[in-house]
Amino acid sequence: MEQTLPKEDIKRSLAKTISWRLVGTLDTVLISYLLTGTLAIAFSIGAIELVTKMLLYFFHERAWNNIKWGK
């Protein structure tokens, strides 16, 4: 008999999305600053990246939650 694992709660997916994006955005801001030497540009790039990648990650995570492979 195959055991059914519970699906991940949407709140957990949101928390993971936000925490991972903060780490990723700090990395992007640092790299952008090292390349441009301008904090304003680095933070602008980081802000855009924060929003777009958070949305992409959230939907990616939710889609993977529906895939049984590897569970």
Image: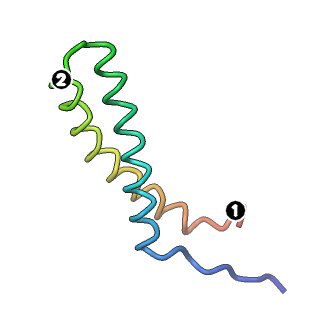
Q: Residue at x 41, y 64 (%)?
A: 15
Label 1 belongs to which residue? 69
Q: Quadrant of the N terminus?
A: bottom right
Q: Could you say where residue 64 lies in the image, as x and y percent from the top left?
A: 54, 61
Secondary structure type for disc 2: helix
Q: Outermost residue, left direction?
A: 40
Query: In the figure, is residue 58 to the left or right of 42?
Result: right
Amino acid type, label 1? Trp
Q: Residue at x 25, y 13 (%)?
A: 36
**Residue nearest the viewer, comparing 18 with 68:** 18
Q: Residue at x 26, y 47 (%)?
A: 51
Query: In the figure, is residue 49 to the left or right of 62?
Result: left
**Residue nearest the viewer, comparing 7 with 29:** 29
**Residue nearest the viewer, comparing 55 with 19:** 19
Q: Could you say where residue 17 lies in the image, as x and y percent from the top left?
A: 41, 57
Label 2 belongs to which residue? 41
Between marks 2 and 1, how big is the CA–CA gap?
A: 41 Å
| Between discs 2 and 1, the one toward the N terminus | 2
Near mark 1 (Cα within 10 A), the count class, few <14, some 14-19 or many ≥20, is few
**Which label belongs to residue 32?**
none
Q: Could you say where residue 5 lies in the image, as x and y percent from the top left?
A: 67, 79
Amino acid type, label 2? Ile
Q: Is residue 68 above or below residue 33?
A: below
